[in-house]
């Protein structure tokens, strides 16, 4: 009987120990947890400009945050950018598991000069590890203080450009800049280096849209690694141009012939299904195709493939001009207005089409209203476009020489007869192709400028 009572007492003691030890063990494991705080730093680049915002988020899901400290070290001097104690009265004994800070860094105001520096970050949590100092996360970032905008030296002297036309600007930058080029109103044309031995020299082909007149502002803009921006004016003259008006009569014969080519839905209760389909093609599909082409124009090689005047379709006659203001009529009523962004050239049916100049084939496919189309990249943002083809003689990625046959004229797309729609695209803007057929214009506006810079 005594042995049984003694055994029960042992059980009781073990139970009490278990009841006490388990919570204590759990408490100690949470207080001595070993997971470091998480630190997320958002800095646009590792270069800090004259005024820079830094965003930093700290979090600790277990014990909570103890502190966050950020300093900028340069030339033996450390400037504190943030020193936050999460146990201070400011937080009223609230345990902080996550916090985000926006820090404005202005090197000039805090006495930090341009040059290499170190951004240091220390974060600790409320764990009892590290002799009650908590788990620590330490981060160092090598940064560059850069408060000066790049210098821009305009090397090309004159820039005469017609409304709807093109031009070339050449400039030198004082430092590497991830983005530079020519602003034409709200439009931006990127600059490219690599043509000249001095890689600080950039060339930009740019264009005025048909609807940008003499009051359009044109200037060079450059942004360095830190985001410092510099603008520089250039000498330019814009010649105003009035474009021809044209009337296109749309017949039922044309609608019944061409509209089945396009997979466009119209309302089931439409009383003029073919006409409604034409309007959707001429408006909506035209916009979609335009976006596709101009997107292709942004992809280019940093090489000047072409040489001399561009060639036009041999033995052809002009059937429509660049930026013709087209008015579409159906049974005497005006139904639509569009702008023709190319030149239509007609010869005999299925005429062989020569590449207008040397380049790399960037696109070979059907393209909505343009039908079967070839686009050639001539380098530095300059492309030529050949549309309504009946067939292709080249493949994407193929290098072609001036005069090499790339396809045949045809009636694909929204074409009313066999012809070639020829376009010149500069980055994202269609320009007047007539200029590029003119050897004198190219000498005065393109090659003359390049040779002038080379000779200096």
Image (cartoon, rainbow, N blue to C red):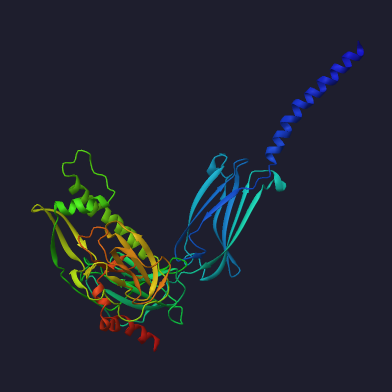
Q: Quadrant of residue 97?
A: top right
- Left or right: 265, with 301 as reference point: left
How far from the left and from the top, in percent, is residue 428?
Answer: 32, 65
Residue 36 vs residue 381, the one in the foreground: 381
Considering every residue shown, the one lying at the far left of the view is: 332
Look at the image and tell me whether residue 336 can be seen.
yes
Question: Residue 399 appears at what percent x and percent y?
Answer: 42, 72
Residue 40 in the image: x percent, y percent? 55, 52
Farthest-out residue, front: 349
| Residue located at (69% from left, 43% from top) | 128
Of residue 1 and residue 395, the one placed in the foreground of this image is: 395
How far across and how far down the image is residue 351, in percent? Answer: 27, 70
Residue 379 seen in the current view: no
Extreme residue toward the right, this view: 2
Looking at the picture, tell me which residue is in the foreground, 438 or 203. 438
Residue at 50% from the left image edge and 58% from the top image edge: 43
Q: Does residue 443 sit above or below 109 in this rendering?
A: below
Above or below, 436 relative to 178: below
Relative horizontal placement of residue 9, taking residue 101 as reference (left or right): right
Query: Which image quadrant is residue 7 in?
Result: top right
Please identify the quadrant where the N terminus is shown. top right
In the image, taking residue 175 as reference, residue 418 lies left or right, namely: left
Question: Relative to residue 173, is residue 13 depicted above or below?
Answer: above
Judge by depth and name the residue closer to the eye, 342 or 122.
Answer: 342
Instruction: Quadrant for the C terminus, please.
Output: bottom left
């Amino acid at each position: 009987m005594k042995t049984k009572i003694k055994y029960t007492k042992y059980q009781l003691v073990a139970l009490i120990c278990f009841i006490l030890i388990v919570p204590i063990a759990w408490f100690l494991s949470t207080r001595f947890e070993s997971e470091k705080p998480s630190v997320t730093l958002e800095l646009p680049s590792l270069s800090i400009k004259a005024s820079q915002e830094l965003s930093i988020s700290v979090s600790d899901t277990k014990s909570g945050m103890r502190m966050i400290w950020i300093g900028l070290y340069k030339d033996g001097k450390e400037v504190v950018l943030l020193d936050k104690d999460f146990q201070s009265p400011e937080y009223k004994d609230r345990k902080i598991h996550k916090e985000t800070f926006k820090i404005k860094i202005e090197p000039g105001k805090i006495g930090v000069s341009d040059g290499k520096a170190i951004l240091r970050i220390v974060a600790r949590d409320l764990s009892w590890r590290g002799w009650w100092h908590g788990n620590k996360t330490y981060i160092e970032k090598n940064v560059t203080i850069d408060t000066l905008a790049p210098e821009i030296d305009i090397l090309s002297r004159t820039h005469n450009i017609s409304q709807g036309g093109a031009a070339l600007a050449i400039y030198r930058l004082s430092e590497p800049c991830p983005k530079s080029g020519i602003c034409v109103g709200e439009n931006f044309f990127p600059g490219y280096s690599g043509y000249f031995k001095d890689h600080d020299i950039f060339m930009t082909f740019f264009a005025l849209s048909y609807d940008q007149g003499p009051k359009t502002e044109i200037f060079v803009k450059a942004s360095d690694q830190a985001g410092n921006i510099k603008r520089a004016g250039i000498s330019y003259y814009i010649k105003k141009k009035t474009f021809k008006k044209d009337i296109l009569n749309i017949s039922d014969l044309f609608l019944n012939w061409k509209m089945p080519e396009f997979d466009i839905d119209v309302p089931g209760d439409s009383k003029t299904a073919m006409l409604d389909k034409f309007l959707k093609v001429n408006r909506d599909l035209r916009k979609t195709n335009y976006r596709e082409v101009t997107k292709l124009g942004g992809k280019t090689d940093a090489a000047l493939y072409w040489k001399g005047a561009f060639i036009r379709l041999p033995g052809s006659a002009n059937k429509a001009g660049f930026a013709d203001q087209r008015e579409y009529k159906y049974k005497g009523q005006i139904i639509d207005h569009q702008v023709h962004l190319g030149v239509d050239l007609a010869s005999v049916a299925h005429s062989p089409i020569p590449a207008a100049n040397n380049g790399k084939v960037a696109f070979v496919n059907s393209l909505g209203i343009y039908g079967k189309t070839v686009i050639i990249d001539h380098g530095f943002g300059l492309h030529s476009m050949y549309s309504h083809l009946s067939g292709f003689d080249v493949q994407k990625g193929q290098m072609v020489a001036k005069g090499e046959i790339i396809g045949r004229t045809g009636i694909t797309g929204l074409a009313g007869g066999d012809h070639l729609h020829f376009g010149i695209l500069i980055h994202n803007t269609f320009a007047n192709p007539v200029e590029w057929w003119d050897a004198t214009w190219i000498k005065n506006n393109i090659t003359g400028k390049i040779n002038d810079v080379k000779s200096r």
